[in-house]
Image: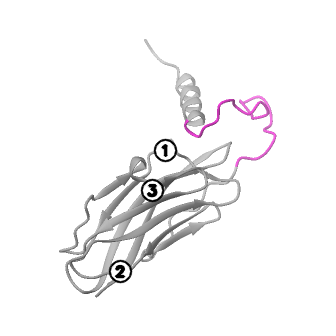
Amino acid sequence: MKTKWWILAVVTSLLLAGACGEDDPDPGASTGGGEPTEAPPEAPPAEPEGPPGPLAEDPTYELRATAGGPYTAGEAGTFQIQLTPRGDYHVNQDFPIEIALSGPDGMTLPTASLGNSDAAELTEERARFDVGFTPAAAGEQTVTAEVDFAVCTPQACFPEHRTLALALAVN
Protein backbone atom coordinates (compact mmCIF):
# COMPACT_ATOMS: atom_id res chain seq x y z
CA MET A 1 0.00 0.00 0.00
CA LYS A 2 1.37 3.42 -0.95
CA THR A 3 1.69 6.06 1.76
CA LYS A 4 1.02 9.61 0.79
CA TRP A 5 4.00 11.92 1.46
CA TRP A 6 1.80 14.47 3.18
CA ILE A 7 0.72 11.92 5.80
CA LEU A 8 4.37 11.38 6.70
CA ALA A 9 4.91 15.15 6.86
CA VAL A 10 1.95 15.63 9.24
CA VAL A 11 3.06 12.77 11.49
CA THR A 12 6.63 14.09 11.57
CA SER A 13 5.39 17.59 12.46
CA LEU A 14 3.28 16.22 15.31
CA LEU A 15 6.19 14.16 16.64
CA LEU A 16 8.55 17.15 16.55
CA ALA A 17 6.00 19.37 18.29
CA GLY A 18 5.58 16.75 21.01
CA ALA A 19 9.35 16.43 21.44
CA CYS A 20 9.52 20.14 22.25
CA GLY A 21 6.92 19.78 24.98
CA GLU A 22 4.16 21.41 22.96
CA ASP A 23 0.89 19.72 23.91
CA ASP A 24 -1.47 21.70 21.70
CA PRO A 25 -0.54 23.10 18.33
CA ASP A 26 -0.82 26.86 17.97
CA PRO A 27 -4.37 27.45 16.74
CA GLY A 28 -3.16 30.49 14.78
CA ALA A 29 -0.31 28.63 13.10
CA SER A 30 -0.52 28.09 9.40
CA THR A 31 -1.50 24.63 8.23
CA GLY A 32 -1.30 25.59 4.63
CA GLY A 33 -4.45 27.70 4.42
CA GLY A 34 -3.84 30.69 6.66
CA GLU A 35 -1.23 33.04 7.93
CA PRO A 36 0.61 32.28 11.20
CA THR A 37 -0.03 34.65 14.06
CA GLU A 38 3.70 35.24 14.49
CA ALA A 39 6.78 34.37 12.52
CA PRO A 40 8.66 31.30 13.74
CA PRO A 41 12.06 32.04 15.27
CA GLU A 42 15.00 31.95 12.92
CA ALA A 43 17.29 28.95 13.07
CA PRO A 44 20.55 29.60 14.90
CA PRO A 45 23.60 30.19 12.71
CA ALA A 46 25.87 27.31 11.73
CA GLU A 47 28.88 26.47 13.90
CA PRO A 48 31.58 29.08 13.41
CA GLU A 49 34.78 28.07 11.69
CA GLY A 50 38.09 28.14 13.50
CA PRO A 51 39.53 26.27 16.44
CA PRO A 52 37.12 25.40 19.24
CA GLY A 53 37.47 27.05 22.63
CA PRO A 54 35.75 26.74 26.00
CA LEU A 55 32.74 28.80 24.83
CA ALA A 56 30.19 28.35 22.03
CA GLU A 57 27.33 30.81 21.88
CA ASP A 58 24.74 32.53 19.75
CA PRO A 59 21.59 34.56 20.52
CA THR A 60 19.72 31.39 21.60
CA TYR A 61 22.19 29.79 24.05
CA GLU A 62 25.57 29.75 25.77
CA LEU A 63 27.52 26.48 25.98
CA ARG A 64 30.56 26.72 28.23
CA ALA A 65 33.25 24.41 29.62
CA THR A 66 34.79 25.65 32.88
CA ALA A 67 37.86 24.41 34.72
CA GLY A 68 37.66 23.96 38.47
CA GLY A 69 41.37 23.42 39.32
CA PRO A 70 43.91 23.45 40.64
CA TYR A 71 44.64 20.02 39.24
CA THR A 72 47.46 17.64 40.20
CA ALA A 73 48.86 14.86 38.02
CA GLY A 74 47.58 11.47 39.16
CA GLU A 75 44.70 12.93 41.22
CA ALA A 76 41.04 12.99 40.21
CA GLY A 77 39.55 16.33 39.27
CA THR A 78 36.40 17.72 37.66
CA PHE A 79 35.38 20.39 35.20
CA GLN A 80 31.93 21.51 34.10
CA ILE A 81 30.04 21.74 30.84
CA GLN A 82 26.96 23.94 31.06
CA LEU A 83 24.23 24.83 28.56
CA THR A 84 22.22 27.97 29.31
CA PRO A 85 19.47 29.01 26.89
CA ARG A 86 18.82 32.71 26.25
CA GLY A 87 15.67 34.76 25.71
CA ASP A 88 12.54 32.71 25.05
CA TYR A 89 14.53 29.50 24.54
CA HIS A 90 14.68 26.54 26.93
CA VAL A 91 16.67 23.32 27.20
CA ASN A 92 14.73 20.52 25.56
CA GLN A 93 14.91 17.89 28.30
CA ASP A 94 13.40 15.23 26.02
CA PHE A 95 16.05 15.66 23.31
CA PRO A 96 19.01 13.37 23.95
CA ILE A 97 21.92 15.53 25.05
CA GLU A 98 25.09 13.71 24.07
CA ILE A 99 28.63 14.69 25.02
CA ALA A 100 31.56 12.77 23.51
CA LEU A 101 34.79 13.45 25.44
CA SER A 102 38.41 13.00 24.46
CA GLY A 103 41.67 13.96 26.12
CA PRO A 104 45.41 13.55 25.65
CA ASP A 105 47.18 10.21 26.00
CA GLY A 106 47.41 9.21 29.63
CA MET A 107 44.36 11.19 30.78
CA THR A 108 41.69 8.97 32.28
CA LEU A 109 38.07 9.87 31.61
CA PRO A 110 35.79 7.50 33.59
CA THR A 111 33.34 7.68 30.71
CA ALA A 112 33.95 8.84 27.15
CA SER A 113 30.33 9.88 26.67
CA LEU A 114 27.65 11.53 28.77
CA GLY A 115 23.89 11.78 28.31
CA ASN A 116 20.81 13.23 29.97
CA SER A 117 20.93 10.78 32.88
CA ASP A 118 24.51 11.91 33.69
CA ALA A 119 23.56 15.57 34.16
CA ALA A 120 24.20 17.11 37.57
CA GLU A 121 21.35 19.51 36.71
CA LEU A 122 18.81 19.25 33.89
CA THR A 123 16.03 21.84 33.82
CA GLU A 124 14.51 24.07 31.15
CA GLU A 125 16.83 26.85 32.39
CA ARG A 126 20.10 24.88 32.43
CA ALA A 127 21.86 21.61 31.70
CA ARG A 128 25.05 21.09 33.71
CA PHE A 129 27.48 18.19 33.63
CA ASP A 130 30.28 17.67 36.16
CA VAL A 131 32.96 15.78 34.25
CA GLY A 132 35.49 13.69 36.14
CA PHE A 133 39.00 13.00 34.87
CA THR A 134 42.47 12.08 36.11
CA PRO A 135 45.48 13.70 34.38
CA ALA A 136 48.58 11.55 34.10
CA ALA A 137 51.17 14.31 33.67
CA ALA A 138 51.80 17.92 34.60
CA GLY A 139 51.39 20.68 32.03
CA GLU A 140 48.53 21.98 29.99
CA GLN A 141 46.07 19.21 29.11
CA THR A 142 43.29 19.92 26.59
CA VAL A 143 39.98 18.10 26.75
CA THR A 144 37.60 18.18 23.78
CA ALA A 145 33.83 17.78 24.05
CA GLU A 146 31.54 17.18 21.06
CA VAL A 147 28.11 18.28 22.32
CA ASP A 148 24.69 17.55 20.76
CA PHE A 149 21.66 19.30 22.30
CA ALA A 150 18.50 21.22 21.41
CA VAL A 151 17.17 24.58 22.52
CA CYS A 152 13.51 25.32 21.87
CA THR A 153 10.74 27.87 21.95
CA PRO A 154 7.08 26.83 22.18
CA GLN A 155 6.99 27.04 18.36
CA ALA A 156 10.22 25.34 17.27
CA CYS A 157 13.24 23.30 18.33
CA PHE A 158 16.77 23.69 17.02
CA PRO A 159 19.11 20.71 17.35
CA GLU A 160 22.73 21.81 17.66
CA HIS A 161 26.19 20.25 17.46
CA ARG A 162 29.08 22.22 18.96
CA THR A 163 32.68 21.46 19.84
CA LEU A 164 34.34 22.77 23.00
CA ALA A 165 38.03 22.61 23.89
CA LEU A 166 39.12 23.28 27.46
CA ALA A 167 42.76 23.71 28.49
CA LEU A 168 43.40 22.39 32.00
CA ALA A 169 46.51 23.47 33.90
CA VAL A 170 47.91 20.44 35.73
CA ASN A 171 50.64 20.64 38.41
Q: Is residue 29 above or below residue 99?
A: above
- Counting from the top left corner in percent of width and height, residue 145 is at 37, 65
Left or right for 55, reference 36: left
Most prominent secondary structure in the magenta stretch? Answer: loop
Quick one: quadrant of the N terminus? Answer: top left
**Disc 1 marks which amino acid?**
Phe
Q: In the picture shown, does residue 47 fall above or below 16?
A: below
Query: Which residues are the magenta region?
Result: 19-40
Q: Which mark is residue 120?
A: 3
Which mark is drawn over residue 158?
none
Residue 168's label in the rendered image is 2
Label 2 Cα crowd, 10 Å radius (few <14 / some 14-19 / many 20+): many
Disc 2 or disc 1, which is closer to the eye?
2
**Residue linked to disc 1:** 95
Q: CA distance from mark 2 to mark 1?
A: 29 Å
Element type where label 3 sits in the image: loop
Amino acid beneath label 3 = Ala
Kind of residue indicated by mark 2:
Leu
Specify whether 1 is left or right of 14.
Answer: left
For the residues bearing labels 2 and 1, Cβ distance under 8 angstroms: no
- From the viewer's perspective, tell me whether residue 6 is left or right of residue 35: left
Disc number lying in front (1 or 3): 3
Whether residue 37 sits left or right of residue 44 in the image: it is: right
Question: Residue 79: image x %, image y %?
Answer: 40, 70
Residue 131 lies in the magenta stretch: no
Neighbourhood count class around disc 1 (C-alpha, 10 Å): few under 14, some 14–19, many 20 upward = some
* Residue plotted at (76% across, 47% down): 39
**Residue extending farthest front:** 75
Distance between mark 1 and mark 3 Cα atoms: 16 Å
Query: Toward which corner of the image does residue 111 lie, by quadrant?
Result: bottom left
**Residue 85 picture location, percent across and down:** 61, 58
Frontmost residue, 60 versus 84: 84
